[in-house]
Amino acid sequence: MAKEFVLVQWFTDVGQIRPRQELRRFNSREAAVRFVMEELEKTSRRKARMIVEGAEFGFVDIVQMYAGRKP
């Protein structure tokens, strides 16, 4: 089984005229979801999207994945 490639994209606009695109790569959906929900600032979190094997998930999808994770 091949490793899963997950990319999280979000925009930061703190003190900038134009938002800057940020990207971060993860080895699993769980790690990517946890990063978005626990490490990103609230203002950036709502602009985040996750790309997994060509499928794109928006913030609402990420929130649902986070709520459904195992404790």
Image (cartoon, rainbow, N blue to C red):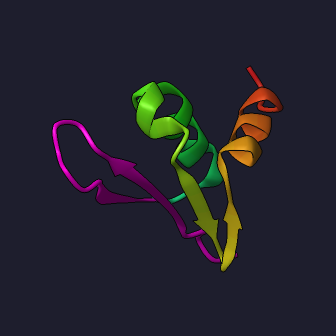
Q: Residue furthest top?
A: 71
Q: What range of the chain is rendered magenta? A: 1-25
Which residue is nearer to you in this view: 47 or 38?
47
Q: Is residue 33 left or right of residue 62?
A: left
Q: Is residue 59 left or right of residue 38?
A: right
Q: Is residue 47 above or below residue 24?
A: above
Which residue is nearer to you in this view: 68 or 71?
68
* Residue lying at 64% horizontally and 68% vertically, measured from the top left: 52
Q: Position of residue 30 (x, y in %)?
A: 63, 44
Asked whether 5 falls inside the magenta stretch, the response is yes
Q: Residue 63 is drawn in which quadrant?
A: top right
Which residue is nearer to you in this view: 7 or 4?
7
Q: Residue 50 is drawn in which quadrant?
A: bottom right
Q: Position of residue 5 (x, y in %)?
A: 55, 70
Which residue is nearer to you in this view: 25 or 41?
41
Q: Is residue 38 above or below residue 45?
A: above
